[in-house]
Amino acid sequence: NAGVMQNPRHLVRRRGQEARLRCSPMKGHSHVYWYRQLPEEGLKFMVYLQKENIIDESGMPKERFSAEFPKEGPSILRIQQVVRGDSAAYFCASSPPGAPATQYFGPGTRLTVL
Amino acid sequence: GQQLNQSPQSMFIQEGEDVSMNCTSSSIFNTWLWYKQEPGEGPVLLIALYKAGELTSNGRLTAQFGITRKDSFLNISASIPSDVGIYFCAGLSGSGGSNYKLTFGKGTLLTVNP
């Protein structure tokens, strides 16, 4: 049973470009969470999604960031017009329905903005 | 916002020694979790605590949920080199009667000298 998969593992963008980060949850998991980790910091909650629904996006910056979890396919975290401050590791986690405490994390995508 | 304070920030120990680290919060959490993160990877769940006062073990790891629900500690006995990594505490919270948002501490970096 494959774990949470994220791609790409490393992404380099120039300022002003768009970054798209993908997350495929574990089989049977319909809940997806995105977290951001800055160097030497803990992870910070960004958004919680279920299939086709955004449940809580209180941790997402109001501009340039968006997330989706379509009926088919992976969850996508999209960052438009990236700036240097967006450089971080972005982690996706998934959980089965009714068990949000058991969040399994992917390996992360390390975004570097030049 | 909610904050978790972990201490110590880092520890350097000899193989075979016992380790203790703790986490305090300004807010009450109904669930506490301890994660381990290795370089280039996502956090891996070690122990979950669901009840105030609960003491739970997982092999050489033991964690307790404080009575006030504002603190927790993690002990590692007889450390081995593969215990190296960053240990994060996290509290689970949410809204609308549903807990799903993990708030992480900044981590304790553990180095074990063989």
Image: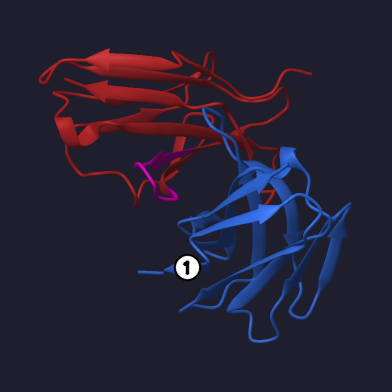
Chain colours: A red, B blue
Farthest residue to the left: give it.
A16
Q: Quadrant of residue B31?
A: bottom right
Magenta residues, start to end: A34-43
Name the residue carrying label 1. B4
Question: What residue is at 58 percent from the left and 28 percent from the top?
Answer: A106
B109 displayed left or right of B60: left
Residue A85 x/y as whole percent = 19, 37
Q: Quadrant of the N terminus of chain A?
A: top right
Q: Residue at x 69, y 46 (%)?
A: B45
Please, is residue A40 above or below residue A23 in the view? below
- Say which of A18 and A49 sits in front: A18
The answer, for residue A98, to whether it is visible in the render is no
Q: Quadrant of residue A105?
A: top right
Residue name at image x 55 percent, y 78 percent: B28
User: Residue B90 versus residue B10: which sits nearer the camera?
Assistant: B10
Q: Is residue A42 magenta?
A: yes
Q: Chain of mark 1?
A: B
Decide: is A110 above or below B100.
above
